[in-house]
Amino acid sequence: MSENVTEDLKGLLAAGTATVSDALDRLGLKGSAHGIAPLANGPRMAGPAYTVRYVPVGDPKGTVGDYIDDIPPGAVAVLDNQGRTDATVWGDILTEYAASRGIAGTAIWGVCRDVATALRLGYPMYSHGRFMRTGKDRVEVADTQVPVALGDVQVRPGDIVLGDDDGVVVVPRHRLAEVTDLAVTIAEREDAITAAVLSGETIGAARARFGYHTLQRGQEQLSRTGPW
Amino acid sequence: MPTSLTGRLKALDTCAVSDALDFLGITGATTGVRPMWGRQKIAGRARTVEAVDAAAGPAGRHLGTQTVASSGPGDVIVVANRGRANVSSWGDILTAAAQYRGIEGAVIDGACRDLDAVAEAGFPVWARAAVPVTARGRLAERGSDVPVLFDGVLVTPGDLVLADGSGVVFLPADRAAEIIETAERLAARQDAMRDAVWAGQPVTEVMHDDRFRAALSGDE
């Protein structure tokens, strides 16, 4: 088991969101962010979450904030706009600035605009899709670094957010090493099955030999009392 | 009885604080960063340094010098080098400068060097490794007193740091009071458990999960 988050992040990236999702299933963890899709194929991201929570604008009107100055390089911006698709919370200025500062990527429960910039820079961006109307004077930042949601998945500050062509998964920070180990193991099994069938074994035999149909299935969770 | 937050923090240990962070669902404990010599404990406010590959950063001032030159008593230098342990990001000159300024110590998500001189000087340093390889030409400073990731933990300048024989924990400044209060409650409970063991109570009972949960929830 690695003792270094950087190593765990490499392991997660290599395993990919699909395999990590299987690992989460096996551990009985919710973390697969349904409906949050990549803007483009290719870019990937893995890093601790910096969370931002939006609410509909009030009176007096708030702002969409300057929180991005507080996000360290390597972190993932996680924006909770309550799934709204009628007002954007991310555009080209934020993309340029985030990319230049080495921020790992952005995941939005909502929509983004000015996507040409993200596509040109290969900036990892995940959302409900694209729309052009600004969120200014429609939504405001209510809070940063609090628990937020990506669809039906909770994201706490510091949880690990992984994104690739298949979408976004969230790994609770205190389960990171466990999830990474399991994902790497599952990936090895799947690689072994692929190698076996490509060298002539039937898929039934190979899957049976490596336990394919139950890779994602956990033992019943025994009384889990806490992270200690 | 110390009353400042850092005073109360220093009276605790990293394990009690880590348990409190777990209980409150806050990310703050790190792993793999160890004291480089002897038995030391420091508590203070984080002053951050962000290291990057020399090729990716600006040429000029040496890694860490800006932060050290503007820090003092009550401050802990936090060097974020993404766990990179094959090059030093702290050595004897920075140690001398830090001691001259009265800085509490340094915690490094990476490696240090000049370990004999650092230990001789009695300056507390936590790191992943000691290596002879210099940062000069290999690492540059991208930022001083900026938010950084340290073993994946977001550290903002002014957050609290506690480091001891078990490692390093960070407490977000705006949650520090709550974390310390919880840790104090846990530490008191741990003391009582130890006393119970010495009073002859079986450790199987003393360390049972139910007892620990009761200590956290406060309904015993």
Image: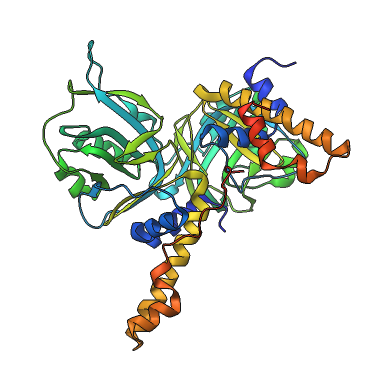
Would you say B152 lies left or right of B3 here?
left
Instruction: Please tell me which residue is depicted at 78% across the width and 31% down the height of the picture.
Output: B191
What residue is at 83 percent from the left and 33 percent from the top?
Answer: B195
Residue B137 visible: no
Q: Position of residue B15 (x, y in %)?
A: 67, 37
Image point 51% across, 28% down: which residue?
Answer: B172
Q: Quadrant of residue B147?
A: top left
* Number of dots carrying numbers: 0
Quick one: quadrant of the N terminus of chain B? top right
A48 vs B181: above or below: below
* Residue B76 visible, this orientation: yes
Q: Nearer the viewer, residue A213 or B154?
A: A213
Pick out the residue farthest to the left.
A132
Q: Quadrant of residue B162?
A: top right
| Quadrant of the rendered image containing residue A193 | bottom left
Residue B68 located left or right of residue A39:
right
- Residue B7 is left or right of residue A156, and the answer is right
The residue at the far bottom in this view is: A200
User: Looking at the picture, how far across and down is residue B40, in whole percent?
Assistant: 74, 36
In the rendered image, residue B103, in percent from the top left (x then y), is placed at 64, 27
Residue under the image location 29 percent in, 42 percent down: A107
